[in-house]
Image: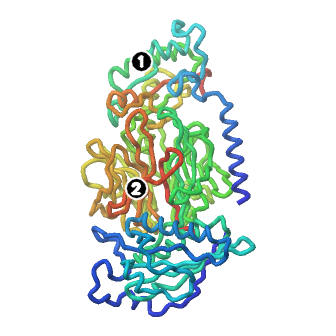
Amino acid sequence: MNSFFKAVLLIGVMGLAACTNPDRYGAGGPGGAGGIDSSGLGANDPDSPAYFQQTIGDKVHFAVDQHTLTAEAQATLARQAEWLIGHPSYSALIEGHADEQGTRIYNINLGERRANAVREFLISRGVAGNRITTISYGKERPLALCSQESCYAQNRRAVTVITAGAGV
Amino acid sequence: MTLTRVPFVRAAAVALALLAPAVAAEAQNGPLRIEITEGVIEPLPIAIPDFVAETPAAAEMAQQIARLVAADLVGTGLFREVPKDAYISRITSFDSPVQYADWKAINATGLITGAVGLGTDGRLVVKFRLHDVFSDTQLGEGLQFAGTTSSWRRMAHKVADAVYSRITGEGGYFDSRVVFVAETGPKGNRKKRLAIMDYDGANVQYLTDSSAIVLAPRFSPTGDRVLYTSYESGSPQIMMIDVASVGRRTLLPAGEGMSVAPSFSPDGNRVVFSIARGGNSDLYILDINSGVQTRLTDAPSIETAPSFSPDGRFVVFESDRSGSQQLYIMPASGGEARRISNGAGRYGTPVWSPRGDLIAFTKQNKGRFHIGVMRTDGSEERLLTASFLDEGPSWAPNGRVIMFSRESQGENGAPALYSVDISGRNTKRVPTETFASDPAWSPLLP
C-alpha cells in the first residue's frame, strides 16, 4: 500500500509540473503555428509562419476513409512546397487527423497515411525529406466538434505545422 | 494485501443435491442453477440477509459486505434479490440450522448466509454458505476468506464469485480490475490518463498524468503490468507500466516509426503490436526479455489491433487489405492469414475470448457502431449493442461479459464505459468519476 500512496503523490507532482508548461501546441492549438510567435508582422509578412498558415493554407482535406490527395489539396500543397523551398530555415511537421467515425487505432493509422501522403507530395515537389516529419493524431484532436458531415469534413485533414530549424 | 481462502465445512453430495429433481416444483422453484447460454432468463430470486457480525466492531462491515455481494449478483441480470421485508426467518447465528421452509415460503430459490469477524489486529474474516432452498441443503462447501479490512470489497467480490460459479457453472469475474483511459476537458482537447479500478468502478487509481495522450491499455496475464500507446515521446509509441510501482518504459528503440496497439501473449513474455512507417502499418511480435522483434505481416495495407489466442498459437487482427477493415487470423509464428469476417460493414478491434471460443469486435455499418461476437471461423456473428459510437470490447475473465466504450454524439459528446453479456442482455453503464474509454479487463485476481 505504501508504494501506491507514493505513486499517487508522484502523479500529483507530475501533474503540477505539467500545468506550469506552456501549451505544447502553441497559441494556435493543435492546428496552430507550432508555438512560434506569429504576432509580429503576422500574416502580411510572406516570410512568416503565420503567412504560411493563413494565406498559403496549412490544411488539406480528405474524403471519408481516404488518403488520396484531391486536386484542391494538391494545389495547396504545391504552394506549401514552394514556400518551404524558399524558406530553408524552417521545417515542417505534418499532422494527420481523422473524423470520429472510426475505431481509435484504425484512425491513428489512417492519420499516419494521410500525413505521409502529404509528405510524399511535398518531397515530389522538391522539399528535402529530412525537413518533413509526420505525426498522427487519429481522431484524438478534432477541430470541429459537431457529429455531422460538416464537421467531419473539417476533421479529415492534414495540417502542415511550420517549425524553426533546418531539418534533421 | 493477502487473501486466504479455506474450506471449513465438508458438504455432502453436492452434485447429487443439485441434480435431484425438485419434484413438481414450479419453474421458479427449480434447482439452484442458471444456464447462461439460455435465450431469456427470469432472474433467479435469492435472499442475501446481512452477514452475522461475530464481533461488535464488525457490524457495519457485515452489512456492507452482504450489500456488495448482492450488488455483484443482481448486477449480472441473472439474479434478483428477495426484499428483506419479506423475510420470515432471521439469520442471527452463522452455525444455527437454516429454516428452509421459511425461505421457501418467500420463494427464495437461493440463500446466502455469512459471518464477518474483525480481529483486534485489524484482520477481517469473512465466511459464507450458499443454500439451495428447495433442496433443503447447502450448495458446495462453506468458504472462508481472510484479509485486511481495506480489502473488504475484494472479499465480498470473492464470495459473489463463488456463488456465481456454483450456480452458473462458469468462472466468476467480480474480483477483477479494469484498466482504462480517464478523460477530462473539452472534446477538442481531451486530457487522458491511464487509470485502474475495480470491475464495478470502485477504488480508482491513476497510473499516469495527463501530459501525454494515452490509448488502448491491455493487462498482462497476471495483471501486474499494463501495455499501452502513449504520445509521451511526441509520436505514438508502445509502452509498458508496472502497476505497483507505476514505473514505465518504452519497449522499442527510438526512430522505429509509429508503434501502436500492443497486447500481451498469454505467457506474458511477448507483445504483439503494429508499427507504421511511410503510410503502411504491419504487425510485429516483440520478445520483452530479449528485445528481439519478429515481423508478422508484410502488406501495403493497414494491419493493426492484434490479439493473441489464449493458447498463444494464433493472432487475430484487423486489416484493410481487401479495401475495408476486416478481421483475419494467422499463426503467431507467421504464415498465411485467413479472413474471418464476412458480413456487411467494417470490422475492427478484434479480441480473442479467454475461453478461446469467440472473437469480440467493433462493427461499423450504415453509420452505426456495434459490439459483436463471432466464432473463430467467422460463423454465428451476433451483434450485442448498437449506438452512435461503440468501440473497443474487452472480455471479462470468464468470457461471459464484455466491457466497451460508448461515446455520445455532438459538441459535448463524451465517452463512458458500458458492459454487456455475450447474450446481448444487461447492457449497463460502469460508473466512473470522469469520462472514460478503452477499458481492458484484468484476469481474475488470485
Residue B319, image x and y in percent?
A: 37, 49
Instruction: Measure how far apart labels 2 and 1 are at the Cα level.
Output: 51 Å
As drawn, B376 above or below B306:
below
* Location of mark 2 (residue): B428
For residue A154, side relative to residue B260 (left or right): left
Whether marks 2 and 1 lie on the same chain: no
- Residue drawn at 26 percent across, 87 percent down: B24
| Vertical position of residue A152 compared to residue B363: above or below | above
Q: Chain of mark 1?
A: A
User: Element type at marker 2?
Assistant: strand
As drawn, B404 above or below B165: above
The residue type indicated by label 2 comes to Lys
Tell me the quadrant of the picture where the C terminus of chain A can be found: top right
The image quarter containing residue B383 is bottom left
Q: Chain of mark 2?
A: B
Q: Mark 2 Cα within 10 Å, few/some/many (few <14, many 20+)? A: some
Where in the figure is residue B54, as x and y percent of width and height? 64, 78
**Which is nearer the eye, A157 or A153?**
A153
Left/right of residue B60 with respect to residue B69 in the rendered view: right
Q: What mark, if any, has residue B430 been given in the picture?
A: none
- Which residue in the rendered view is the most extreme toward the bottom? B12
